[in-house]
Amino acid sequence: MAKSRLTFYGGINEIGGNKFLLEDGSSRIFLDFGKNFGREKQYFDEPWITPRKEEHLLALGILPNLDRIYKKDAAGSPGVDAVLLTHPHTDHYDSIRWLRNDIPAHMTATTRAVILAREFSGSTGPSKDYHIGDWTKEGGQQVYRPMETLQPAKPIRVAGLETTAFQVDHSVLGSVGYVVETSAGNVAYTGDFRLHGTRGDDTRKFLQKAAEHEPAALLIEGTHVTESKIESEEEVERKVTKVVEDTRGLVVAGFAPADMDRLSTFHKAAVATDRTLIMTEKQAFMLHQLTSQGLFGDFDLKSKNVLIFRKERARSARYLDLLQDTYGGKVVEARDVRGLQERAILVAGLPDMLAMPEIDPAPGSVYILSSSEPFNEEMEISYDKLMEWLTRYGLPVFQVHASGHATAHDLRQAVETIRPKQVFLVHTDRPALYARFLEKLGFNTVKPIEGTPYPV
Ligand SMILES: [Zn+2]
């Protein structure tokens, strides 16, 4: 048996559900431990039928069947030493909730804040035993499992292996790639990344740093190997501003709730067109958590041109109380939106369409759909149902988006910069095409098979 090896348990031949086990001697580290939306969707349909405990996912072969890593199997020392998380998209982290609490997860402070903002504002999910964090009776925020924060570009030792995270640009803040030094050579992992975003230079620096480590193995995503589009966040800002300028009534906009860059872009468009950005409560709570910890500074909830939309709901929740207590004057309801719709951009996805009857969008109102990430990355939009609502209220749709994922040219640039001995193709539903593309450029590629160990 090779001393150092990689075994893939999801996130291969598919987008999302990344769970890559890196072993070196007695050290065992998971690179990401994400929810596999594609496979879970085959069996589950929230909220009607959802996995309640790890056995439900183990029985279906969705979670890897490994000893002493799950909560149900808590005796003795843990079967893996740690998890390294690249970024706070659920398909990269969410299944850590099934893991024993004595298996620490390492991540950036921003990734931690985004994950916890989701936990503290979440409404569904499995029972309390599997919560990552929750409110205390006194209204405090309690974290149940070790969520160790690391500094980008500062090497740390994880399970005895020198490990460095480097910031990369992606459609969520806090994203990093990793270089882990093993006895058989260095392993680099991109996580999800792009070069065309506002922080593309971070990604370029990571590629350079990874190259300096002369990796034996590179694990690289390939989400857009058949869907490359030339686009940028600046272009999104320009186009959104143009659409808003030309709109007579209300502008309604939908995009990934954790994408703070996109929120910032819509805020800029609101300022430029003298409108007010009315965001959802979940977005407001995430923005609050990030700005109050100094992790995001583009704008905050006290800024001009910002309001929070209070959704009608059966009962309150702690995070809503916090918003009300802290930003009470900024909270508006459907009837308020109705009154200021010619001067507003309202962020609203399918779950917010319940407000449409009361808002009653004025003639000339439009919808801006600013999200096309693979559905199994976050699964926030149910396109068909949203279209029924937009049809009902006569809202035509403008699509304006820049993806979180690298184009094929940028994937090539990444591999040509790093020049690894082996390239493991992950987070792609077209590994064969991706492999052929890179092989013709002279690279040694691996299309991993689930559960098969590969020497580093
Ligand atoms: Zn992602």
Image (tube, rainbow, N blue to C red):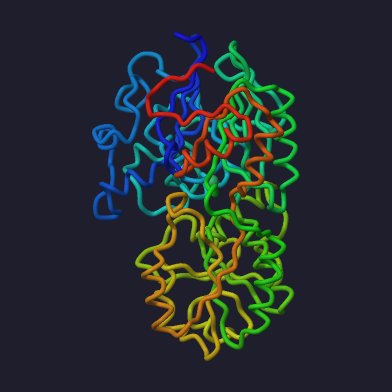
Can residue 329 be spotted in the picture?
Answer: no
For this orientation, the residue located farthest to the front is 440
Quadrant of image for the C terminus: top right
Give the x, y percent position of residue 235: 70, 65
* Residue at 72 percent of width and 62 percent of height: 234
Residue nearest the viewer, comparing 286 with 317 = 286
Quadrant of image for the N terminus: top left
Can residue 123 be spotted in the picture?
Answer: yes
Give the x, y percent position of residue 136: 44, 44
Residue nearest the viewer, comparing 270 with 395 = 395
* Residue at 44 percent of width and 37 percent of height: 11
In the picture, measured across the screen, residue 117 lies left or right of residue 98, that is right
For this orientation, the residue located farthest to the bottom is 363
In the picture, measured across the screen, residue 122 lies left or right of residue 417, that is left
**Residue 350 in which image quadrant:** bottom left
**Residue 94 in which image quadrant:** top left
* Residue at 43 percent of width and 62 percent of height: 381
* Residue at 53 percent of width and 37 percent of height: 436
Residue nearest the viewer, comparing 125 with 429 = 429
Vertical placement of 92 versus 230: above or below?
above
